[in-house]
Amino acid sequence: GAGVSQSPSNKVTEKGKDVELRCDPISGHTALYWYRQSLGQGLEFLIYFQGNSAPDKSGLPSDRFSAERTGGSVSTLTIQRTQQEDSAVYLCASSLPTSGTQYFGPGTRLTVL
Amino acid sequence: TQLLEQSPQFLSIQEGENLTVYCNSSSVFSSLQWYRQEPGEGPVLLVTVVTGGEVKKLKRLTFQFGDARKDSSLHITAAQPGDTGLYLCAGALNFGNEKLTFGTGTRLTIIP
């Protein structure tokens, strides 16, 4: 596709359930980022993948959060045992290795009841 | 601790007026970016500034990076309803393709 895509666009789940959020970056972009945006707020960095390097997980809020990037392309963010405070929009971005421009997807709105 | 503080948090003005949004930090950034985000969409990059004192213009938008690379401003001249949105500044602490630290955001509403 032409841009970063994310699925699902909306996810409603019950407290304690696990969820998986998917990100398809722009073809050829080796860098991939996950951010979290709470209602009306700025973005909070979660995790960063660059090529085959070990990911920068410094922004993950707890061990309930994890992310994978298979084959250097698609990424999945997994939240285990979801809590109500996990409710937010989860945004994915990708970029070329030599460019500072991050292209964002539309996000996945997660609601934990 | 919020590294980047934006002000004002909310701004509602009449069409045709001018406005300035500020982004301030105690940290030095290698580069600073401004994004605009509309409901249901991800942020879209407007500009990147990398040199202290740098000024960039994008039509009616003027962006300035502070001399010490700790702060930035966005000035909009003759605001139009299409300028409505959430404006976010974001700084990179290191050169290269690193994670961004985002500001708290300024929600701008232009009243026709």
Image (spheres, coloured by chain):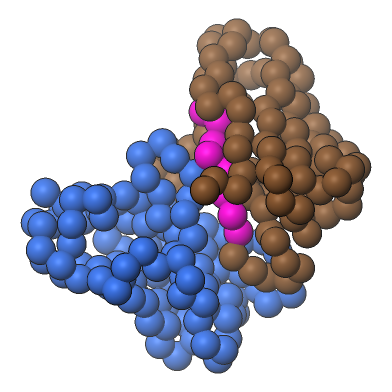
Give the residue drawn at x 83%, y 40%. B66
Residue B23 shows in the view: yes
Establish if A52 lies above or below B77.
below
Residue B82 shows in the view: no
Establish if A50 lies above or below B44.
below
Q: Position of residue B24 (x, y in %)?
A: 69, 38
Give the residue drawn at x 44%, y 40%. A41
Establish if B34 lies above or below B74.
below
The total number of labels drawn is: 0
Q: Is residue B101 magenta?
A: yes
Q: Is residue A26 left or right of residue B93?
A: left
Q: Quadrant of residue B72?
A: top right
Q: Position of residue B112 (x, y in %)?
A: 55, 9
Q: Quadrant of residue B96?
A: bottom right
Give the residue drawn at x 67%, y 70%. B97
Q: Quadrant of residue A62?
A: bottom left
- Which chain does the blue colour mark? A
Give the residue drawn at x 82%, y 42%. B65
Q: Is residue B57 left or right of residue A68?
A: right
Establish if A71 lies above or below A55.
below
What colour do you see for chain B? brown
Residue interval drawn in magenta: B100-107
